[in-house]
Amino acid sequence: MSNERIEPIKMVEEQGKGEFNAPEKAVHFFDIWDLASKKYDEETFDHLINEGYRFVDPDGGAYTKDQMIGSVMGGRPDFEYYNQSEFEVIPYGENAALKRSVLTTKGKFHGQEITGRYRQANLFIRDEKGWRISYCQLTRIEEDEPL
C-alpha cells in the first residue's frame, strides 16, 4: 500500500476526533473528499460516508452511499470548478452537526449540466468510525435570487 493510499485514511481518522463545530472542520472534510475523489479512493469514501447516507440532487433524485461511491469511482461528478462559501456549522449535541453553505460549480453529474449556484445542506453524524456525512441536499439558486 503506498503512502498516497494511506494519507486520506489517516486524514479521515484525525477528522473523526473532537467536535464538529467550526467551518474549518467542514472545509477540511471536503478537502479530504476532494483528495479521495481525485485518487478514486473507494476505501476513504467508505469511511467518509455513513451507511444511511442520502444525496438529494437539485431535481429531487436520491442516491445511496453505494450509488454515490459508484458515481465518484466512475468519474462522476465531473467538475471543472467547485467552490463552497458562506459556511455555517451548527452542532446538535455531541454527535450531530449541520453544515450549510453556498456551492458554486461548473461541471456535470451523471451527464447532467450542474453549472450554477446551490444552497447546500450536509448532515454529519459521529458514529464508531468518527464524523461521517449522512445527508446532502442541493437546491439551485436562480441567478437573480439574492443569497
Image (cartoon, rainbow, N blue to C red):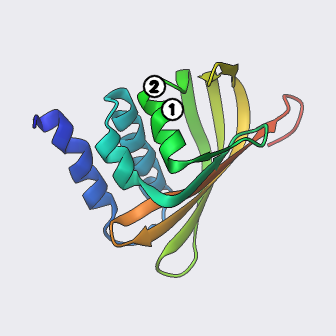
* Alpha carbons under labels 2 and 1: distance apart: 5 Å
Q: Where, by quadrant of the figure, is residue 123 drawn?
A: bottom right
Q: Would you call the spot at circle 2 few (<14 residues within 10 Å), some (14-19), or many (20 or more)?
A: few
Frontmost residue, 26 versus 16: 16
State the residue position of label 2: 74
Name the residue at 47% across, 35% down.
Answer: 70
Q: Position of residue 34 (x, y in %)?
A: 41, 35
Q: Is residue 21 visible?
A: no
Determine whether, in the image, residue 10 is placed left or right of residue 129.
left
Q: Where, by quadrant of the figure, is residue 81 drawn?
A: top right
SS state under label 1: helix
The reply to whether dot 2 and dot 1 touch (C-beta < 8 Å) is: yes
State the residue position of label 1: 71
Q: Amino acid at mark 2?
A: Gly
Is 107 placed above or below 146 here? above
Q: Which quadrant would the N terminus be assigned to in this image?
A: top left
Determine whether, in the image, residue 124 is placed left or right of residue 29.
right
Q: Which quadrant would the C terminus be assigned to in this image?
A: top right
Q: Position of residue 49 (x, y in %)?
A: 45, 53
Q: Position of residue 26 (x, y in %)?
A: 47, 54
Q: Amino acid at mark 1?
A: Ser
SS state under label 2: loop
